Image (cartoon, rainbow, N blue to C red):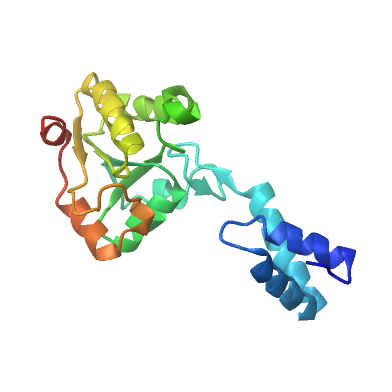
Amino acid sequence: MSLPSTLLEHAVDQLATLPGIGRRTAMRLALDLLRRDAQEVVRFSDAIRKLREEVRFCDVCCNISDEPRCAICRDPQRDASTICVVEDIRDVIAIENTRQFKGLYHVLGGVISPMDGIGPDDLNTQELLGRVAEPGVNEVILALGTTIEGDTTGFFLNRKLAERKVAVSMLARGLSVGGDLAQADELTLGRSIADRKPYEQHAKR
């Protein structure tokens, strides 16, 4: 694609690096930005810059946050006795949208995947075990995707959590096998949370 401006070409190249954005869509977005008021584009670019520079991870649950502790961990109305373990931030958003869960979260930052060189030490597993070791935590929900990597991660965490004598449960299998939580509809995900089962029942099948 030959463009009349090197600056436009650079903008298209950068926009095309975003997931799901091809060069045609990137061109359309770049031209739209070019037509906008200069101050509007400055606000847009500032928002992206601040997102990258100022958003941090919660010191407690590893969720994204503007402060040392995220809004969920700071909320006194949340049930601190229950921790829902998820793969990434998108899963927190998906579960929150169901309005079925009132506990706290723990974001692993991925799943165990030997093929990709990702082991337990590459995830936020030690932080989770540290939280469970504190008094007051009664249940850990393993809300991981129904993939081989998700099951491997769940098996590893269940084994580690068993040493802490805390109840471990998992989402009911209303979710399709091989699917991600973020792709599930809110009704199915909400029911899977409400109908969660002890992890051992799944492991013994």
* Occupied quadrant, residue 162: top left
Q: Where in the figure is residue 100, as x and y percent of width and height?
A: 24, 58
20 horizontally vs 16: left or right: left
Q: Where in the figure is residue 101, as x and y percent of width and height?
A: 26, 53
126 horizontally vs 162: left or right: right
| Location of residue 61 with respect to 128 vertically, above or below | below
Tell me the quadrant of the picture where the N terminus can be found. bottom right
Q: At x 19% / y 58%, what residue is drawn?
A: 191
Q: Residue furthest front?
A: 1
* Occupied quadrant, residue 156: top left
Q: Where in the figure is residue 38, as x and y percent of width and height?
A: 82, 76
Q: At x 21% / y 41%, what residue is drawn?
A: 170
Residue closest to the eye, 149 or 126: 149
Q: At x 23% / y 18%, what residue is drawn?
A: 163
Tell me the quadrant of the picture where the C terminus can be found. top left
| Location of residue 177 with respect to 4 vertically, above or below | above
Q: Where in the figure is residue 21, as x and y percent of width and height?
A: 61, 63
Q: At x 66% / y 50%, what residue is drawn?
A: 52
